[in-house]
Amino acid sequence: MKVVVIGGGAAGMSAASRVKALQPDWEVTVFEKTNFVSHAPCGIPYVVEGLTETSHLMYYPPEFFREKRGIDLHINAKVVEAGEGFVRVEENGQEKKYEWDKLVIANGASPKLPPIEGVELKNVFTAHLPPDAEAIKKAAKDKKDVVIIGAGYIGVEMSEAFAAQGKNVTLIGIYDYPLPRLDREVGEIIKEKMAESINLRMNETAVAIEGKDKVERVITDKGEYKADLVLIAVGVKPNVEIAKQLGCKIGETGAIWTDSRMQTSVENVFAAGDCAETTHMLTKKRVWIALAPPGNKMGYVAGVNAAGGNVEFPGVLGTQLTKFFDLEIGATGLTEKAAKAEGYEVKTAVVKAKTKVHYYPGAKDTFLKVVADANTKKILGAQVLGADVAMRVNVFATMIQAGFTTKDVFFADLGYAPPFTPIWDPIVVSARILKF
């Protein structure tokens, strides 16, 4: 049996590894268009900031997969065509045809570019793959004025990366506050924090990037900003062309439609990771959320099922974490505005607390906004800012997935000791406010 995997990122290598583990006698071939496999693009901002090296963004080198896992891995190999039972690959300046019995599409997503002039100028970048990290880091060494277009997660993280190096950073966003999917009172705290370190320009739209040969300025609908380096971070789009060639259904989100087994509408063709859509655990609607943890798991599920197993992917909550200097930011499930848009009648609780008991040194501020269904009392979502955010967001994510009500949250037997948490953890306090 021949299994071909298109894409050697997290989802692709998870799928390939799972197939080989379950069916060691099968022939498993992976085609990756770059020279990086099993990579961690989430680490790009930290390479640019100087906290780590580009080489460290690859969890395992190609040799590991070839020698230890028996996977026929091809790097710098671009799949240019796919059809029933075959793929055509451009490699080493030549094209070659390979056969498959099972196919896993895991070729990720690509950065969006705004429809403005100047995106092709020198020193205009996107931050999507590990090689981008090295290119940006090298270009930024002698640069002073950096403009970032887009105030999502990448924009926020790259703002820190450049500001930490003493650059003059201007962040341009089209909404009222950074990370606009969060609720307003959460976003306003982030906005205030970021404005302390960078030139934050919200409700503003970039209309052109200008310069002779290389970038010199960014023009917006409200002014212009000097720039010797520009980062475009306006989101990504799923890569679906190969799937279309195979006749795979493209879902309502614009990503590849898959069922709970990560199988596409075409028999023996699976899709996983940033190119594939899935289901939201709460709304049961189709969603496309390009995040690393679910991408890895989608790859795992696709691999198991391609190998003849039967595992279902339950969907996602969209749990996310980031930070801007010492302000940690996390969210899971539905925000208040998202829940209302879905037709829920909601109750919310806002908690301002310390991360430890008041008498223990090192206690820091934390802010929680928790959303519950007013009728069923089930927790729908949580947004957390401040310190020790990951722990609390992950607890909420687990509770939401398990269907916890406010009563369940209140009586959850969470651990306590003065160096770690207050006696009444903010999670429990939120349930007390929401009532049960």
Image (cartoon, rainbow, N blue to C red):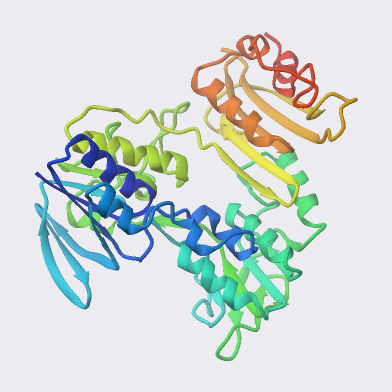
Farthest residue in the right direction? Answer: 359
Identify the image quadrant of residue 407: top right
Q: Furthest residue to the bottom?
A: 212
Vertical placement of 19 versus 46: above or below? Answer: above
Question: Farthest front residue?
Answer: 67
Q: Residue at x 67, y 48 (%)?
A: 323
Identify the residue shown where x is 22% and y is 71%. 91
Quarter containing the N terminus: top left
Residue 167 image offset from top left, x and y in percent: 74, 71
Above or below residue 121? Residue 363 is above
Asked whether, in this view, residue 104 is left or right of residue 8, the answer is left
Residue 173 against residue 119 in the figure, above or below? above
Quadrant where the image shows the C terminus: top right
Who is closer to the viewer here, 59 or 314?
59
> Residue at horizontal 77%, vertical 34%?
366
Where does the image place residue 23, in percent across and percent down from the top left? 17, 37
Figure quadrant of residue 77: bottom left
Residue 336 appears in which quarter of the rendering? top right
Residue 336 in view (yes/no): no
Left or right of 383 on screen, residue 43? left
Position in image of residue 265 (x %, y %)? 20, 41
Residue 340 in the figure: left or right of residue 131:
right
Q: Inspect this view and state whether residue 45 appears.
A: yes
| Horizontal and vertical percent position of residue 48 | 61, 65
Q: Of 31 and 172, which appears nearest the observer?
A: 31
